[in-house]
Amino acid sequence: MRVLIIEDEVKVASFISEGLQEEGYKVAVAYDGKTGMDLIKEASFDIILLDLMIPEIDGLEVLRNARAWGIDTPILIITAKSSKEDVVKGLDTGSDDYLTKPFSFEELLARIRALLRRSRKFDTHLLEYRDIVLNPYTRKLSISTKETELTDKEFMIMEYLLKNSEKALTRKNIAEYVWQNSTDSTNIVDVYVNFLRKKIESISQKRYIHTVRGIGYVLKEEHENP
């Protein structure tokens, strides 16, 4: 799960970030609204934690822009503003929940889990393995906080590998899945796997697609390259 924290108070951001990382979340932090908006546009996240009183661009404007761009990622407002008017304004602008400071980390975790459960009900089409998320609607492959767009054939190979993660697949199996038996040559599989590997290398230092000698390929996580 990938979390973006947009919070200008360094101590608060560090407290949340460290706690979430200990829980297994991948975390990115922005200390002002402009940086936060850039990250929202550049990468995909499972949830965004947004403070309202941040420099450069305030939180409500960040929220308004994110929704205007069509981004439906769950957004949890975390702020010291606790008046009923502030809560209503935040919810009306497009936030999914509102948590006022000070709050316990346990309560924050509970809110995050609830929002993720709610959003996952509508995202069952996503294919996932470790840090990888493949979205069949957008044809985008995300790893941690970065993403790349795939061609149709690259997507279909990645889809087949994800559906059979950690299983060795023959070139013939892959060719039949992707080209529907329209090709007799499995060399084309090697060509497109190479394209796909380069796409993955552009957004991650980890290797995921491995050659199985005499068989074909397997999708499994490997430690970062030196």
Image (spheres, rainbow, N blue to C red):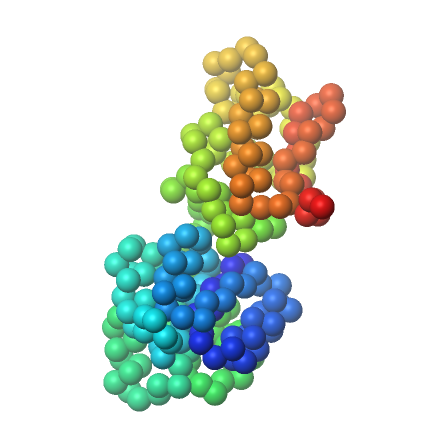
Residue 21 in view here: yes
Establish if 139 lies above or below 60: above
Q: Residue at 39% of width from left, 58% of height from top?
A: 38
Of all residues, the one furthest to the front in this rendering is 56
The quarter of the displayed image where residue 207 is located:
top right
Establish if 126 lies above or below 17: above
Q: Nearer the viewer, residue 5 or 202?
A: 202
Q: Is residue 108 left or right of residue 65?
A: right
Residue 128 in view here: no
Q: Position of residue 157 (x, y in %)?
A: 53, 30
Q: Position of residue 193 (x, y in %)?
A: 57, 28
The quarter of the displayed image where residue 64 is located:
bottom left
> What count of labels does the image hold?
0
Of all residues, the one furthest to the top in this rendering is 184
Q: Is residue 214 left or right of residue 113?
A: right
Q: Residue at 38% of width from left, 76% of height from top?
A: 54
Establish if 90 lies above or below 140: below
Q: Residue at 54% of width from left, 59% of height from top?
A: 1
Q: Residue at 54% of width from left, 53% of height from top?
A: 144
Of all residues, the one furthest to the right in this rendering is 213
Q: Position of residue 17 (x, y in %)?
A: 56, 71
Q: Position of residue 171 (x, y in %)?
A: 62, 22
Q: Nearer the viewer, residue 33 or 63?
A: 33
Q: Is residue 192 left or right of residue 167?
A: left
